Image (cartoon, rainbow, N blue to C red):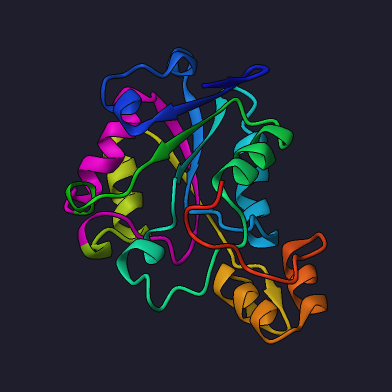
Amino acid sequence: MEQSGFKVYSWDDVLYARIAEAKNGTALTIGSFDGPHRGHQVLFAAVLNEKAYTPGVVTFAVPPPALKEPARFPGLLSTLPERLAFFKESRFAFAAVIDFSLEFSKMAGEVFLSCLQKNCNMRFLAEGKGFRCGFRGETDMVKIRRIAQRAGFRVLTAEPVLYGGEPISSSRIRLAIETGKLTDASEMLGRPASSALKRVGWH
């Protein structure tokens, strides 16, 4: 899939090294990025500032919490097409979209990062302090920095962006929308918030 120079790849494309932009190295950030909000923007800026590498995003078709506990998930802040449009407007070169599955959930964090490092030629990774990946979130930023030292890519750990003294998160924004606090939701998003959450599966 291609949108005027912005390309969208699947996880299979990553596994089979089909990422054309990987030739000269990539700078990446990984996450659901439901929103995306002002905290995410710090990660995006860090990736886009790595001028020597091609900027990309690794995201999920549906945020994993919506699949793991659908009865408790209140709804999406943005659909996948909306997120992809945001990445394109932000001047990312590509996005790799993961369809979260039971098989994928069992992948070790080091294996996941190795796939990105080898098949996307990842040279730089930007994540927040609380980022975790791999089976049961086993791989935190401390482990990721150790992996990066061995594998030869750089890692930036971003401090959280605060609003009202607390870190901005997609969960906080969802709660603000659910309770009618649209001003707070808009401030955390950095743009006007919708008055309603979206059902999983909307396109």
Relative to 34, say whether 187 is above or below: below
Q: Nearer the viewer, residue 165 or 58?
A: 58
| 44, 182: nearer the viewer | 182
The quadrant holding residue 54 is top right
Q: Determine whether, in the image, residue 168 is placed left or right of residue 171.
A: right
Q: Residue at x 45, y 73 (%)?
A: 73
Q: Please provide the residue range marked out in magenta.
A: 106-135
Residue 22 falls in image quadrant: top left
> In the rendered structure, does residue 122 fall within the stretch colored magenta?
yes
Residue drawn at point x = 33 percent, y = 72 percent: 69
In this rendered view, identify the residue nearer to me: 27 or 198.
198
Residue 26 image position (x, y, % from top left): 49, 26
In the displayed structure, does residue 8 sit left or right of residue 18? Answer: right
Residue 57 x %, y %: 52, 38
Residue at (48, 59) in percent of width and height: 200
Task: Count the numbered circles shown.
Answer: 0
Residue 148 x, y percent position in the rendering = 34, 42
Residue drawn at x 39%, y 24% as measured from the top left: 121
Image quarter for residue 34?
Answer: bottom right
Q: Residue 176's spot in the image, x, y percent?
A: 68, 81
Report the side of 59 relative to 68 (left or right).
right
Q: Is residue 2 magenta?
A: no
